[in-house]
Image (tube, rainbow, N blue to C red):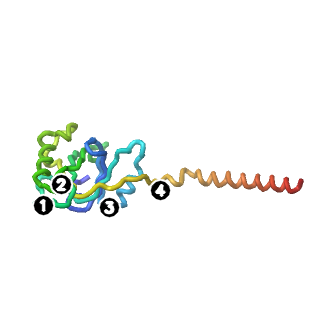
Amino acid sequence: MNIDKSLGIEVFVVAEDEGNYGEIDIHDDFITMQEYLSLLNPDEHNTTKAYHGILMPAHILPPDLKGIRCFILALEMRYRGHVPYLNGYIYESDCEGDVDMLATDVEQVVRNNEFTAAMRVTIDDVFVLYGHELEVCLAINPDSVDGDGVVEKAKNVAKVIKAIETHEKERENAS
């Protein structure tokens, strides 16, 4: 996973609830984010949040943030075998458009590790998502609709039941 390819473009971020350390997924389009979310188990991922915006490194901040919400991400690359993935934290800055407050929040993450106790963070590991939080709702995983042929078996059961009903009606009419 190359985080640099996600910088400066519209992204969708899926992460644990603010302040919780966990896997963070970054998607460059809405469809792949939805496909990813559809694979999550609601019982295990009931604190999952989604965000939308532009991701940028935290070492340079803009001069003006009026009307923009800012989410600070502290990320670290992890591996499952040879497959890379991101872990870390996300939380909303209370900067309310104040760049100095955003800078203070970033500095706290880097220097104090107040919000990132489970990881060692340098400024190169910290990013700002300029955007907003999305509403997350339940959906159906399209891969689960087939159900291993259960519906076809159920159709056969329905045919048998209809045949029995027809046979019983014929017997009643004959009586």
| Amino acid type at image mark 2 | Glu
Residue at mark 1 to residue at mark 2: CA–CA distance? 11 Å
Q: Are marks 1 and 4 in contact (CB under 8 Å)?
A: no
Q: Secondary structure at mark 3?
A: loop
Residue at x 19% of width, y 53% of height: 128
Residue 119 image position (x, y, % from top left): 20, 39
Residue 147 image position (x, y, % from top left): 54, 51
Q: Is residue 144 above or below residue 31?
A: above
Q: Closer to the N terminus: mark 4 or mark 2? A: 2
Q: Closer to the N terminus: mark 3 or mark 2? A: 3
**Mark 3 Cα shell of 10 Å, populated few (<14), some (14-19), many (≥20):** few
Q: Are marks 1 and 3 in contact (CB under 8 Å)?
A: no
| 138 vs 148, nearest the viewer | 138
Foreground disc of the pair 4, 2: 2
Q: Please, which residue is most extreme toward the top here?
A: 118
Residue 82 visible, this angle: no
In-image side of 90 versus 105 (left or right): right
Q: Closer to the N terminus: mark 1 or mark 4? A: 1
| 118 vs 79, nearest the viewer | 118
Residue at mark 4 to residue at mark 2: CA–CA distance? 40 Å
| Amino acid type at image mark 4 | Pro
User: Label 3 belongs to which residue?
Assistant: 29
User: Label 2 belongs to which residue?
Assistant: 96
Q: Closer to the N terminus: mark 4 or mark 3? A: 3
User: Label 4 belongs to which residue?
Assistant: 142
Question: How many numbered discs, if any?
Answer: 4
Residue at x 18% of width, y 54% of height: 96
